[in-house]
Amino acid sequence: MALWPAPDSITPLPDAPIMAGLLAGIAPEDAWQVRIEQRMTIRITPRASVPMPQMFVGMPEEGRGDITERKIGKCLPVAGILSVRPDRANRLLLLMRDSKVVSAELDRSCRARDFYSGFLIKRSEDGRLCVDRDTLLSRGGMSCRLTRIRQLVEEDR
């Protein structure tokens, strides 16, 4: 009794075109499918090593009389944000890499102090943070929409 069949009794495999035709009628199962997804989250944190701009040093929080807001559009580059600090009520101060200070206003229901340890945002295709489009997620779980951005500048005396 032989363990292996004799060479004459082995049937050859069908040709590749015939095999492809046989497999064409079989519907793929879920296990055959692979889905690759990529999600990127950007983290903006407060940094102790980043000095507060000179115009804010020694001024009380509410009494910033010689600082005005200027329109800067509805978006700003995420890569340009160096650090974040909560300001008053529902406003964050974004310190930019080019030494500008940007005021980012959140929904009325949001509190800036919830963002004391920074925030997370989803990466957008254009790499920008935009008003009425992007949502900031605090490290504590609070989710707030960005409603307005303005650049803070010192008034000329």
Image (cartoon, helix red, strand yellow):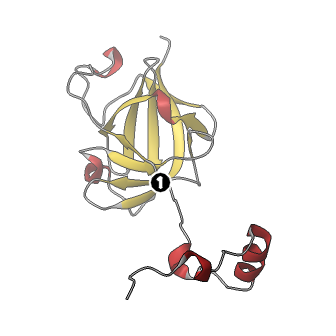
In the depicted view, which residue is nearer to us: 152 or 139? 139
Q: Residue furthest top?
A: 157
In the depicted view, which residue is nearer to us: 2 or 22? 2
> In the figure, 20 relative to 95: above or below?
below
- Disc 1 element: loop
Q: Amino acid at mark 1?
A: Arg
Which residue lies at the image location 32% right of the left edge and 40% below the top edge?
87
Q: Residue furthest front?
A: 1
> In the figure, 134 relative to 13: above or below?
above
Quadrant of res 33: bottom right
Quadrant of res 19: bottom right
> In the figure, 22 relative to 127: above or below?
below
For label 1, count other residues whose C-alpha is less than 10 Å away and answer few (under 14), some (14-19) or many (20+): few
Which residue lies at the image location 43% right of the left edge and 79% below the top edge?
4
Relative to residue 57, is residue 106 drawn left or right?
A: right
Count of marks, rendered view: 1
Q: What residue is shown with label 1? A: 39
Residue 63 in the image: state x and y as whole percent.
31, 32
In the depicted view, which residue is nearer to us: 4 or 27? 4
Relative to residue 6, is residue 47 drawn left or right?
A: left
Which residue lies at the image location 72% right of the left edge and 75% below the top edge?
14
Image quarter where the N terminus lies is bottom left
Residue 156 in the image: state x and y as whole percent.
50, 12
Which residue lies at the image location 39% right of the left edge and 61% below the top edge?
143
Residue 129 in the image: state x and y as whole percent.
54, 42
Residue 126 in the image: state x and y as whole percent.
63, 40
